[in-house]
Image (cartoon, rainbow, N blue to C red):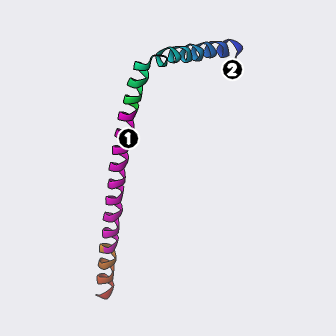
Amino acid sequence: MSPVAAGVVGAVVGAAVGATAVVLSEEENRKAIGKKFNEVKDKVGEVVSGVQDKAQEVVENAGDKVDDAKKHVAEKLSE
């Protein structure tokens, strides 16, 4: 990375950190951010739970399909 690019990136990161510090210095903003963080965390938990349930359903259905296939093969072999 060129020194100029590194300087620009450093300036942008510094400005972002400074702006964040100003926003977080006010208690009302910290509370709002904390509330939003908890809402997002709860939504992520719901999504993860839904994905886990769906994955379990897929596994169970796959097991049923394998059992059906085994029965079908056994029937064909016994003919």
> From this viewpoint, which residue is outermost toward the right?
3
Q: Is residue 29 above or below residue 75?
A: above
Q: Is residue 26 above or below residue 35?
A: above
Q: Which quadrant holds the N terminus?
A: top right
Front residue of 6 and 47: 47
Predominant SS along the magenta part: helix
Q: Which residue is mark 2?
A: 1
Residue type highlighted by circle 2: Met
Residue at 35 percent of width and 59 percent of height: 56
The quadrant holding residue 69 is: bottom left
Front residue of 3 and 42: 42
Residue at 37 percent of width and 44 percent of height: 45
The quadrant holding residue 39 is: top left
- In terms of secondary structure, where does tag 2 sit? loop
Residue at 66 percent of width and 13 percent of height: 7
Q: In the displayed structure, does residue 59 sit left or right of residue 25?
A: left
Q: What span is in magenta?
A: 38-67
Q: In the displayed structure, does residue 10 sit left or right of residue 55?
A: right
Q: In the displayed structure, does residue 34 sit left or right of residue 50?
A: right
Q: Which quadrant holds the C terminus?
A: bottom left
Residue 59 in picture, x, y percent from top left: 36, 62
Residue type highlighted by circle 1: Val
Residue 62 in picture, x, y percent from top left: 34, 65
Q: Which residue is mark 1?
A: 44
Q: Gap in Å between the C-alphas at discs 2 and 1?
A: 37 Å
- How crowded pointer 2 is (Cα within 10 Å; few <14, some 14-19, many 20+) is rated as few
- How crowded pointer 1 is (Cα within 10 Å; few <14, some 14-19, many 20+) is rated as few
Residue 13 in picture, x, y percent from top left: 58, 18
